[in-house]
Image: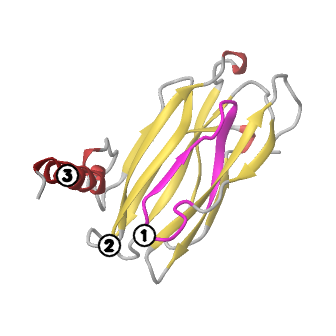
Amino acid sequence: MNPALVVLVSSLLVTVAAQSHDHHDMAWVNSYRQGFNFQCPHGEVLVAIRSYFSEQDGSDRLWTFECQPTPEGLGEPTDCWWDDINRAGLEWTSTCTRNGLVAGVQSKYFESVLDREWQFYCCYYKRRCPYSCMKTTDIPEYYREEGELVVPSYGYFIRGAQTTFSGVLRDRQWKYILCRMTDFDCEFENL
């Protein structure tokens, strides 16, 4: 067999093996079955969310998040708070109250249900209002797969999520609520 071909095939196998285990190299904010509290630095909001499922580890997920500063025109957040909390094993829809943007997440794992409670950390920016809101498709597309959301365009922000829980597969799918924010002050709340 051609030695160059052997080297090429070997390097491809090493690359594929490394890609299939890349979840070990991520900066996860939690360990399996452990709670976590993640908050973006002041003036930043969530722009990316990634999770990795393991049935062997309590049907739980590892989570990692990325933040980005908000545009200068949005100004500084004037108030931040922990919003609604869900109950493990139940469906949940949460949009930051007071037109807030998601700037953090906390979660607690419950062994008895093999699921987590969730809560968003929301920040309020003057009197800006959301518009052109949309929900993402299911993330992950199928239960027990790796999930990833990267906000698709600068100027869109995560305002909340809708999540369903499969009692059979012991996993969640998420539809994130993404919105643009007005460049002007407005009088409305919770659009």
Q: Quadrant of residue 91?
A: bottom right
Label 2–label 1 contact, CB within 8 A: yes
Q: Closer to the N terminus: mark 2 or mark 1?
A: 2
Distance CA(mark 2)–CA(mark 3): 25 Å
If the image is split into quadrants, where does the C terminus sit?
Answer: top right
Q: Which residue is mark 1?
A: 144
Task: Identify the magenta region.
Answer: 139-162
Q: Position of residue 12 (x, y in %)?
A: 24, 51
Residue 96 in the image: above or below residue 164: above
SS at badge 2: loop
Q: Earlier in the sequence, mark 2 or mark 3?
A: 3
Q: Secondary structure at mark 3?
A: helix
- Kindly identify the residue that appears in the image at 64 percent across and 19 percent down: 76
Q: Looking at the rendered structure, which numbered label has been put on residue 14? A: 3
Would residue 52 be found to the left or right of residue 95 on screen?
left
Tell whether 112 sits left or right of 149.
Answer: left
